[in-house]
Amino acid sequence: EEIAQFMCARMMENDLFYSASDADTDGAEGKYFVYTRDELLGALQSIGITGDEAEQKCIRLSATAEGNFEESNVLRFPDAQREPWFDALKAPLLKIRDERTYPFIDRKVQVSWNAMMVKALFILGNVDARYTEQARKSLKALSETMILEGELYHSTLINKPPKVKAFLEDYAYLGTAFIEAYQQTFDESYLIEAQRLANLALERYYDSGRWFFSKGEFVTEADTSDSSYPGAIGVIVDLLLSLGILVDEKYRHFAFKTLEYYSAKLMKTPIYFPYLCNQALRYVNGERLVKSDRQRLQGNRLALQKLRYPYTQCKPEASEEFMVCGAQSCFAATKQLEELDELISSSF
């Protein structure tokens, strides 16, 4: 939630998210984010923590007089477990930061990266509906800004018309964001848009199981590997499999042909393609669809998100029960949400 609050407050304009922020200020890396030990002691004193207790708190936050990062300190709990007293300390620490110059922000808007953020906000909406609302607004702004006359574009600057046409990863990530939007709202317009993007990607970048990242002047084959974020091929297979269970089984054929084409790489070195490997497991093991009336599904979104079997989608249908289904038929039904895990497991 704190990450989402930061992104919405610092990295968002007109409901669109900027692409990046520098780590350095005035030529010094991390200058905005780090603290001297004296600054930390002053912040602790402002909330009534002094003497030996303050010294112990400095140790807990890994702060030393000489510093743990270029003569200052990155504050962190060594065991990654935040202690309750830190909540009160955040306000004076943030006040110290507010007096500094924030690093340069790259105000470029990139479709694939915005789509990741939108998807995350929809998922976070399971615990706070405000994020669902922000996700809807951001997805609307992204679509209106980056889809012009039916053509998807890759990136632009805030309040500037886009000029660079989209790559495969833009179709893949935006498509999966629309799938998540549908899963959280059951607004069928999102499902229609996900299908449209998948169809365009298949038409433009697909060739008998092989995928291209871009075509036109520069023809580039898509990379199967995941880097700092999942590669486009794994994400497009994710989109195709979701559409295969939610809309039309024909999309599973294209997912299978993709997995078949890249299967040698997957078998030899799966560690390089974790996202695509996960989709292969998804295809082999099969998916489950939980159906019930819209109100019952929406009222239990968080619990449904926590179902043990990872390859589970939801779809509204007129029923007073939760039905566990595959692509062709349903296997079981129950009125008790807590029975779903067992029913899904026994359906294989």
Image (tube, helix red, strand yellow):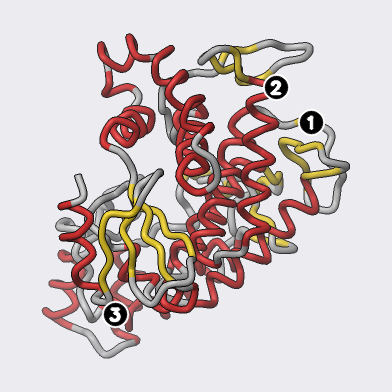
Looking at the rendered structure, the kind of residue marked 3 is: Leu
- Residue 338 visible to an observer of this rendering: yes
* Badge number at residue 164: 1
Instruction: Locate residue 15: give its quadrant.
Output: bottom right
Closer to the chain start, of discs 1 and 2, is 1
Residue 153: percent from left, percent from top = 76, 37
Label 2 neighbourhood size at 10 Å, few (<14), some (14-19), many (20+)?
some
What kind of residue is marked 1?
Val
- Which residue shows up at 25% across the image and 60% down it? 332
Tell whether label 3 touches label 1 (CB within 8 Å): no
Tell me the residue that label 2 is attached to: 204
Q: Secondary structure at mark 2?
A: helix
Q: Nearer the viewer, mark 1 or mark 3?
A: 1
Residue 264 vs residue 294, the one in the foreground? 294
Image location of residue 260, percent across then percent down:
39, 15
Q: Which residue is mark 3?
A: 44
**Can residue 96 be spotted in the picture?**
no
